[in-house]
Image (cartoon, rainbow, N blue to C red):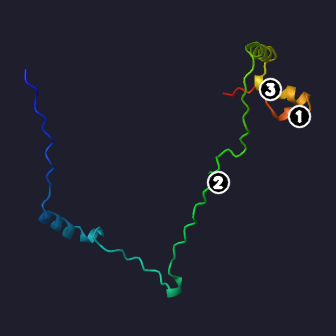
Amino acid sequence: MSKTVFQPAPRPKPRTSPEEARQLAEAAEDLGFTRPSTAPEPERLPSETPVAPEPVPASPNSPLPKRANAQKDPALKFSIPEEVWTELRQRALNERVTVKFLVLRALARDGFAIDLDNLPEDGRRVR
């Protein structure tokens, strides 16, 4: 059993000769495909020549581009004991709220300025 030898694909051959292409161009001249543009050039004074704006050099500490959601709140992440996490999830389940809501409510009770009226109790997405 012999392996077939790899043969590259042949190069495509032009379907029209240069002479046929010239004849087609002559025949289609009246259709406008070979006509130069007839749009008038805008008159410009020598002082009105367009000048490209100078590029602003990038500073080493240039700000990052703004994201679409500029109101994105900062995130907080920390570790807690497994028992506390289980109790938080159970209480959130019983009250039908999120763990985030429970934590923010506790912070509000402790005196932090948190508007609980604008915070959804159940943070699940509405479908």
* Residue matched to label 3: 101
Secondary element under disc 1, as helix, strand or loop, is loop
Measuring from the top left, give residue 69's x and y in whole percent: 68, 44
> Which mark is drawn over residue 17?
none
* Within-10-Å neighbours for mark 1: few <14, some 14–19, many 20+: few
> Which mark is drawn over residue 63?
2
* Within-10-Å neighbours for mark 2: few <14, some 14–19, many 20+: few
In primary-sequence order, the first of circles 1 and 2 is: 2
Residue shown at the point (75%, 20%) measured from the top left: 80
Front residue of this view, candidates 24 and 102: 102
Residue shown at the point (64%, 54%) measured from the top left: 63
| Tag 2–tag 3 contact (CB < 8 Å) | no
Amino acid under disc 2: Pro
Front residue of this view, candidates 97 and 23: 97
Secondary element under disc 3, as helix, strand or loop, is helix
> Which mark is drawn over residue 112?
1
Image: 63 above or below 88: below
Depth check, mark 2 against mark 3: the one in front is: 2
